[in-house]
Image: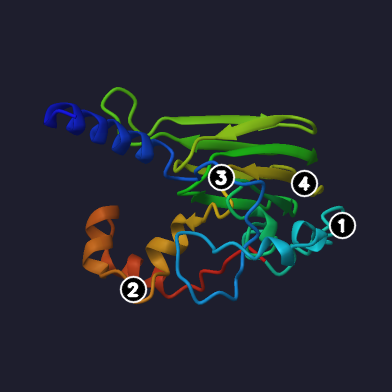
Amino acid sequence: MAASTFLLVAFLALITSQAIASNPSPLQDFCVADKDSPVKVNGFVCKDPMAVNADDFFKAAKLDQPRDTSKSKVGSNVTLINVMQLPGLNTLGISLARIDYAPLGQNPPHTHPRAIEILTVLEGTLYVGFVTSNQADRSNKLFAKVLNKGDVFVFPQGLIHFQFNPVHDKPAVALAALSSQNPGAITIANAVFGSKPPISDDVLAKAFQVQKGTIDWLQAQFWENNYY
């Protein structure tokens, strides 16, 4: 093979692998996560197929039952089912979550760095939206919609998005499917103001164009996680 041809093939292989690097298609029927293995890989090592049983693909998650939102400062409770809770999801590129919203509760602005999300409203009403990235033609544009029972909305991978229950006297429930066995979640306020160690208040005061005292106050708050 000529050197130029070899380089072309290598380049095409590289860009193809990058295109599917998030959650590559499985090369066997399943690869149940062996969370006890000392071997470190991107994801989890496969459990011995001969030791796999139906329980590896099952979880009595009780997703039909309401979750407690009263202890959440933001008024929501996210019950995530990913590869950490269901080993059979390993390499399959999917997970899901039940989200309970108190009246006027929200799932605050956040991103999933490794997944697209499709949200279905099971009960109640939600105001949802996402914001685009820094683009020259439509920088930080908000796409938002009020959803009712049975409605579906898609949040593109990596973009900041939110859900809010605008009803003051009724809760809401949604089910989210995500295109990764481990989608990750970065809650914006928690990451910016609750990082450990904290980001310098000089940096944040300049970024948000406020006094450092405002940043110090925000960093002193308790930034909780609404994922349980």
Left or right: 149 as drawn, with respect to 10 = right
Q: Earlier in the sequence, mark 3 or mark 4?
A: 3
Kind of element beneath mark 3 = loop
Residue visible at 73% across and 67% down? 51
Dot placed on the residue nearer the N-terminal end, 3 or 2: 3
Quadrant in the picture for residue 11: top left
Q: Nearer the viewer, residue 47 or 113?
A: 47
Kindly indicate whether the residue at mark 4 contacts the one at mark 3 (C-beta within 8 angstroms). Answer: no
Real-space Cα separation, disc 3 to disc 4, in angstroms: 39 Å
Three-letter amino acid code of the residue under disc 1: Gln
Could you tell me how far apart the alpha carbons at marks 3 and 1 are, in whole angstroms?
A: 36 Å
Which residue does the numbered mark 1 point to in the structure image?
A: 65
N-term mark: 2 or 4: 4
Instruction: Give whichever of 69, 97 is nearer the camera.
Output: 97
* Label 2 element class: loop
Q: CA distance from mark 2 to mark 4?
A: 34 Å
Please indicate, yes or no, whether residue 80 appears anywhere in the rendered image: no
